[in-house]
Amino acid sequence: MPTGLQINNVTKYYAEGSNRISALERVSISVEFGEFVAVVGPSGSGKSTFLSIAGALLKASEGEVNLNGHLLSKLSDKELSNVRLKEIGFIMQSSNLVPYLNVFDQLLLVKKMSGKVRAEDKTFAVNLLEELGLGSKLKSFPEELSGGEKQRTAVARALINNPNVILADEPTASLDTKRAHEVVSMIAHEVKSRRKAAIMVTHDERMLEYCDRVYRMEDGRLSPAESTSLAAVCKL
Ligand SMILES: Nc1ncnc2c1ncn2[C@@H]1O[C@H](COP(=O)(O)OP(=O)(O)OP(=O)(O)O)[C@@H](O)[C@H]1O
């Protein structure tokens, strides 16, 4: 049974009036456990559509996504939400923390959504927060955190269910250079040490050094980016 994340020949059409917009064209990529892959490309090239399909938020028009052995096209809506909750950790542009929950409770909330919270889940949450440099912030509320701390809390929240796949959409968009390096190096560390398959969409050239492979999306087509053209790709 294949593991990690395999996207095979995925095409996505959007209907716009009587027209059909092709947002992705026969996109294929395979990401193994322990691999951190970046996707760069200009606005409107299909990156969000790609990440939404990889994350079981949107259905492919053609082709197949195999997420750690789950063929997404074969799953019911209930099974898809279960896969999203248990198998995928999402990290978005802004941290989207719940304002009235402290850092520790942000993680427990996600745990509660997937069942009863056990003592070992609490230990796991504390260890994770310590690993991400938030050991002294367990009782802090979002308004008491810096931008980098908020985003690191979001990284911990994405990892609390121990998902196999991490999908990050511009995770450094709201951060200064120092905080951006902190957050992405921590994501990279977690991907390696916990053996996750991870994809990060980014415009941020400085973050590519943390990734194993870089792909470029252009007009809905995905291809490996040449290292010499990376700077140009990211400035688009
Ligand atoms: N719901 C939709 N209905 C119709 N067309 C859509 C829809 N969502 C996206 N598109 C179109 O599909 C193409 C790809 O859009 P997508 O948002 O995936 O690109 P992107 O690379 O993520 O862009 P950005 O970097 O600006 O977020 C664009 O032409 C866009 O206009």
Image (tube, helix red, strand yellow):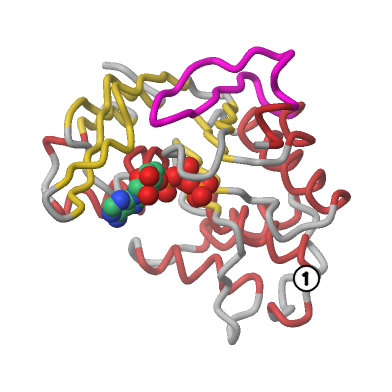
Residue 196 position (above or below residue 179)? above
> Where is mark 1, residue-wise?
137
Instruction: Tell me the kind of residue under disc 1.
Output: Lys
The stretch of residues the image draws in magenta is: 210-231
User: Which residue is painted at 68% across and 34% down in the image?
Assistant: 234
Magenta stretch encompasses residue 119: no
Is 189 positioned to the left or the right of 92 in the image?
right
| Above or below, 191 relative to 79 | above
Up the image or down, 177 lies above or below 5; here it is below
Q: Is residue 178 visible?
A: yes
Decide if residue 57 is in sight here: no
Residue at position x 33%, y 64% in the image: 115
- Image coordinates of residue 38 in percent, x first then y, are 59, 30
Residue 125 image position (x, y, % from top left)? 60, 58
Which quarter shows the N terminus? top left
Helix, strand or loop at mark 1 = loop
Q: Quadrant of residue 13?
A: top left
Q: Is residue 110 left or right of residue 182?
A: left
Does the magenta segment cover residue 224? yes
Residue 142 image point, x, y percent: 69, 77
Q: Residue at x 78, y 49 (%)?
A: 180
The outermost residue toward the bottom is: 100
**Looking at the rendering, which quadrant does residue 126 occupy?**
bottom right
